[in-house]
Image: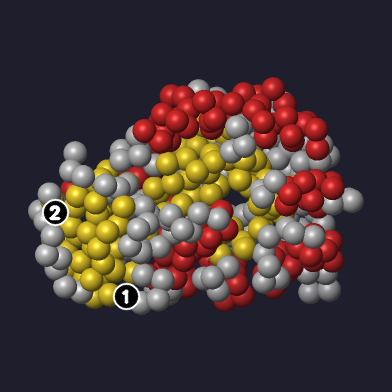
Amino acid sequence: MSSSLLLSNIHIVTKTEIIENGFVGLRDGKIDYISTSPPTGNYEKVYISRENFYLLPGMIDIHIHGGYGADMMDATPEAMNTLADHLPAEGTTSFLATTITQNHQEIEQALKNVAQWRPYNEKQAGSQAQCLGIHLEGPFISKDKAGAQPAQWITQANLPLFEKWLSASDQLIRIVTFAPEEDTDFAFLSLLKEKNIIPSIGHTNAPHDMIELAAKHGARHVTHLYNAMSSFQHREPNVAGAALTNEKLLTELITDGIHSHPLSVKLAYLAKGSERLIMITDSMRAKGLGEGTYEFGGQTVTVSGEKALLADGTLAGSILQMKDGVKRMRQITQCGWTEIAQMTSTNAATQLGIDHQLGSIEVGKLADLVIWDESGELMMTICHGQIVYEKKEATH
């Protein structure tokens, strides 16, 4: 494998500008050169870009349950490898493995599995997407807004149980989705803050004033906007209204055009701006496998067309690939590549506190990158300086 690679004549999407026909040098897994002029040093491999190819930071999916036949809750290293191996083909270079509400033993086993598997994943840095940690979605949520989360395992915020899980995960829990009304004294929220874990408001039926109060106490994230939350009413804005207007809350958005109407996606973009939105897939094991019957959280899910549904018609995660979410977002909002970089990478890295390593194209940062053509087709994915995925038409 090459330990150095030069990307030449490519449009580089940085935080502040788009450098046209630029040069980016990658060495030993990091970015070591960015300029409008070619470098004087030698690189083992040179990739000459076609006209109108755009280089963006690799995408970070902070809310993904599974895909390609695997689910994080399978609690096996094979499942995690399947996911990490397939994600670069959709432009995702790192992710948070996301749980679903289940019995306590199954959640604990899934957390332990990620902790045990992660050292292997770190060794595969140049060949698969990197797991940055865990997003604990449930069980500390509202039964009124369970969505596809199995209601029988939903429970009130339980501090000793969470401490046990945090230990089982080897401190890898980065985000916790919780319902503020199930944590009335905000003791759980305070614990998350103390542990430097992102408290995310989701699967909640709270009114807007409770959300505003939770934000004052340190909640700073919202799980899959519009879905499994009290919806906007003009006299009671509820969770959706608070999420759209509170600047302290970074907000996840599934941009498949199914979980939210395109007009609702556009509304979120207009209200929050690209600086406060994080695009996610919330995908489950059926992603990449086509129509059929699958399992999610111990429940039967039927995939038909682009929808994954429980027997009662409830949406059960998505089968969205990040690259398709980008295409849909660009169609709906007419946003540019700078905004896409923010919503798919920069904001997630900043929220996770790892923006010194990931999230933007800067010298010294990890060489996790994606190349798009101007129409929004993913052409290449680079993980830690190595080409992991290349669209066949893009060969040179």
Tell me: 266 left or right of 30: right
User: Which of label 2 and label 1 is nearer to you?
Assistant: 2
Dot 2 falls on a residue whose secondary structure is loop
Q: Nearer the viewer, residue 11 or 324?
A: 11
- Percent position (x, y) of residue 268? 59, 69
Q: Nearer the viewer, residue 294 or 347?
A: 347
Q: Nearer the viewer, residue 66 or 248?
A: 248
Image mark for residue 18: 1
- Percent position (x, y) of residue 22? 21, 70
Q: Residue at x 46, y 37 (%)?
A: 67
Image mark for residue 177: none
- Percent position (x, y) of residue 100? 64, 36
Q: Does residue 51 show up?
A: no
Colour pattern: secondary structure
For residue 34, which quarter of the picture? bottom left
Residue at which label 2 appears: 43
Callout 2: few (<14), some (14-19), or many (20+) C-alpha neighbours within 10 Å? some
Q: Earlier in the sequence, mark 2 or mark 1?
A: 1
